[in-house]
Image: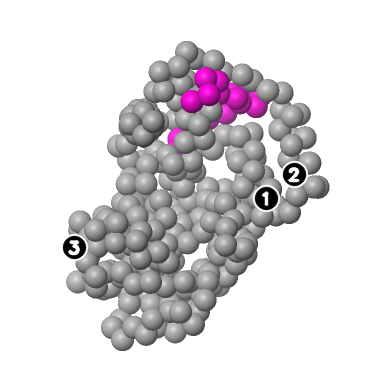
Amino acid sequence: MQGKIMLAGATGYLGGFIAKELKRQRRDFLAFGRSEEKLRSLGLNKNQWQLVDVTKLASFPKIEEPIDTIISTVGITRQKDGLSYMDVDYQANLNLLEFAMRHRVRKFIYVSVLNGSQMRHLKITAAKERFVDALKESGLAYSIIRPNGFFSDMKDFLSMAKSGRVYLFGDGEYKLNPIHGMDLAQVVIDSVTSPQPEVEVGGPDILTQNEIGRLALKSIGKEVKIVHLPDWMRRGVLGMMRTFTNPQTYGPIEFFLTMMARNNIAPRHGVHRLETFFREESDRLRESE
């Protein structure tokens, strides 16, 4: 019988799907998060969650029973609460790793990003890959999950579509296949028993940025209007942001603009379609208006 799983980052986009899937599979698990309201919204039993600030090792609970696997989705896209990427994506995960080693955890599963080792020059990936290095050197069994983008990241296309136009750099023909959180959650949970140390994963549909833009506009009910901006503008924005703003400001923009200028294709997995996601999100937007 598989042992207890500890899930850190349960109140984030992916963590929420993992928590719900663990419950559906009737796994023995404990979910960590900083927001009681968000933890309760997952529909977990009281003995399945605990308030923990993983950036502070002192806040970790005393756990007497053995932990088989730690799953960490801990990370920030947009810095908040005065915390940096190094505070969260690196140090908070390092705290979890120290906890794992102290409690003789068998395996550590960490969700990073596709091609992260090739993008250490970016603030967000520098922190993630520094932790990956520490995990590999720890001696623990590990799996590093490398998705190429979440459906939730594609909401930026919907935001542009709402205004009537989608703006892209270059010709818009770079390709990607983002994945739904529910599909990725299954990959993460399967890694508990899989010996594969690194897993690259994307969604079922490989689309160009132009195709994603068209899907977003159609889901909103707008005429297809896509504006292609010269790539020198993207490079110029990157240069100015790095020169005149701090990492807290330019970090997420740096990552987004870098991803917009490359193919980002990973092995296909899952059943959820981006077109359906856009349609559902558009319906929610209309209902909230």
Quadrant assignment for the C terminus: top left
Q: Which residue is mark 3?
A: 26
Above-or-below relation of 63 to 262: below
Above-or-below relation of 214 to 180: above
Q: Which of the pair 240/103 is nearer the observer?
A: 240
**Secondary structure of the residue carrying numbered label 2:** helix
Task: Describe residue 77's horizontal placement relative to residue 201 as left or right.
Answer: right
* Residue in view at x 60 percent, y 67 percent: 87
Q: Which badge, 2 or 3, comes first in the chain's sequence?
A: 3
Tag shown at residue 74? none
**What's the distance in space between the residues labelled 2 and 3, CA to CA?**
47 Å
**What's the distance in space between the residues labelled 1 and 3, CA to CA?**
41 Å
As drawn, which residue projects farthest toward the right?
Answer: 243
Q: Which residue is mark 1?
A: 249
Q: Which badge, 2 or 1, comes first in the chain's sequence?
A: 2
Q: Image quadrant of residue 194?
A: bottom left
- Its colouring scheme is one colour
* Residue in view at x 33 percent, y 31 percent: 287
Q: Which of the pair 125/269 is nearer the observer?
A: 125
**Residue 80 in magenta stretch:** no
Local crowd at mark 3 within 10 Å, few (<14), some, or many (≥20)? few
The percent coordinates of residue 104 (x first, y second) are 39, 82
Local crowd at mark 2 within 10 Å, few (<14), some, or many (≥20)? some
Tag shown at residue 241? 2
Question: Amino acid type of disc 1?
Answer: Thr
Question: Amino acid type of disc 3?
Answer: Arg
**Residue 165 in magenta stretch:** yes
The boundaries of the magenta stretch are 162-178
